[in-house]
C-alpha cells in the first residue's frame, strides 16, 4: 500500500509547479520521436507476422464445410482490432519504451542530474516525466492503428500466398458485419496503456537508489509491472466498454 500511495503522490507531482508551455512542447516533440517514431519498426514487424499467423491458424481450425471461408478474414479483423493490435503492441512497447524510460531516469538519479534540477528550483518530475506521459498517450494510438492495418494486411498476404483463402473471400470477410464501435474501443486501450507504461516506468526509475545494478533491476521491474498493469486494465476496459 505504501508503494501505491507513493505512486499516486508521484502522479500528483507531475501537475504541480509546471514550466512554460514552450518548454513542454519542445520536450513533448522530442519524446514523440523517441517513444513513437523509433518504435515503428518493431511494431511493424510484430504486427505483420502476428496477423499472418492468425490467418493461417484460423484457417487451419475452420475445417467445417458449413462455415464460409470468408469467416477467416472476419476473425482476423476482429482479433486485430479488439485485442491483438492494442494489447500485444502495448506489451511490446512496454518492453522497449518502459525499460528505456526507467533506465534513463534511473541513470539520471544515480548521477545526481535529477538532484541538480531540484536544486535549481525545477519540478524535476514534471519536467522529465510529464512530456513522456503525454507523448506515450499521443503516439501509442497511432502505433496501434498502424499495427491493426499491418496485421490485417499480413493476414491477407499470408492467406492469399499460401492459398488458404482467395483475395475475394478475404476482402468480403473483413467488410462483413463490421462494428464501427470496435475502432473506438481499440483506440481507448492504447491511450490508457500508454499512460500506465509511461507513469509506472518513470516511477520505477525516478526513485531508484544505488548504482548501475539497481538501474537494471528497476528496468526489469518497470517492464514486469507495466505488463501486469496492461493485462488488468485490459480486463477492466473490456468489462466497462463492451
Image: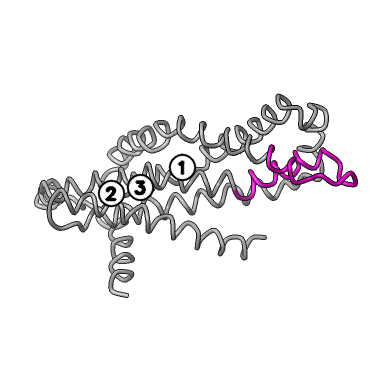
Expressed as whole percent of the image width and height from the top left, the position of residue 87 reads: 53, 49
Q: Which residues are magenta?
A: 56-83
**In the drawing, what numbered circle is on residue 239?**
none
The residue indicated by pointer 2 is 102
- For marks 2 and 1, the one nearer the N-term is 2
Q: Is residue 27 above or below residue 91?
A: above
220 with respect to 189 (left or right):
left
Q: Assess whether residue 38 is covered by the magenta stretch.
A: no
Q: Residue at x 34, y 37 (%)?
A: 31
Expressed as whole percent of the image width and height from the top left, the position of residue 156 reads: 70, 30
Q: Nearer the viewer, residue 171 or 236?
A: 171
The residue indicated by pointer 1 is 138
Mark 1 falls on what kind of element? helix
Expressed as whole percent of the image width and height from the top left, the position of residue 14 reads: 30, 56
Expressed as whole percent of the image width and height from the top left, the position of residue 222 reads: 33, 54
Q: Nearer the viewer, residue 149 or 28?
A: 149
Q: Quadrant of residue 23?
A: top left
Q: Residue at x 33, y 60 (%)?
A: 11
**In the drawing, what numbered circle is on residue 98?**
3
Q: CA distance from mark 3 to mark 2?
A: 6 Å
Q: Residue at x 44, y 49 (%)?
A: 194
Q: CA distance from mark 1 to mark 3?
A: 16 Å
Which quadrant, please, contains the C terminus?
bottom right
Q: CA distance from mark 2 to mark 1?
A: 19 Å
Amino acid at each position: 500500500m505504501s508503494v501505491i500511495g507513493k505512486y499516486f503522490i508521484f502522479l500528483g507531482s507531475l501537475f504541480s509547479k509546471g514550466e512554460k508551455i514552450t518548454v513542454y512542447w519542445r520536450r513533448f516533440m522530442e519524446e514523440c520521436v523517441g517513444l513513437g517514431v523509433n518504435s515503428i519498426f518493431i511494431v511493424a514487424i510484430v504486427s505483420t507476422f502476428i496477423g499472418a499467423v492468425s490467418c493461417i491458424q484460423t484457417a487451419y481450425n475452420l475445417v467445417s464445410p458449413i462455415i464460409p471461408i470468408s469467416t477467416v478474414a472476419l476473425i482476423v479483423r476482429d482479433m486485430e482490432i479488439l485485442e491483438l493490435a492494442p494489447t500485444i503492441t502495448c506489451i511490446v512497447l512496454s518492453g522497449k519504451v518502459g525499460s528505456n524510460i526507467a533506465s534513463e531516469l534511473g541513470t539520471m538519479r544515480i548521477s545526481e542530474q535529477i538532484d541538480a534540477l531540484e536544486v535549481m528550483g525545477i519540478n524535476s518530475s514534471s519536467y522529465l516525466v510529464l512530456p513522456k506521459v503525454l507523448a506515450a498517450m499521443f503516439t501509442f494510438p497511432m502505433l496501434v492503428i498502424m499495427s491493426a492495418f499491418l496485421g490485417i494486411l499480413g493476414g491477407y498476404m499470408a492467406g492469399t500466398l499460401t492459398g488458404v483463402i482467395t483475395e475475394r473471400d478475404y476482402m468480403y470477410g473483413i467488410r462483413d458485419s463490421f462494428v464501427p464501435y470496435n475502432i473506438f474501443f481499440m483506440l481507448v486501450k492504447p491511450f490508457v496503456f500508454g499512460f500506465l507504461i509511461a507513469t509506472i516506468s518513470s516511477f520505477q526509475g525516478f526513485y531508484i537508489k544505488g548504482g548501475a545494478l539497481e538501474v537494471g533491476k528497476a528496468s526489469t521491474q518497470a517492464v514486469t509491472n507495466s505488463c501486469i498493469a496492461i493485462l488488468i486494465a485490459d480486463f477492466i476496459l473490456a468489462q466497462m466498454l463492451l
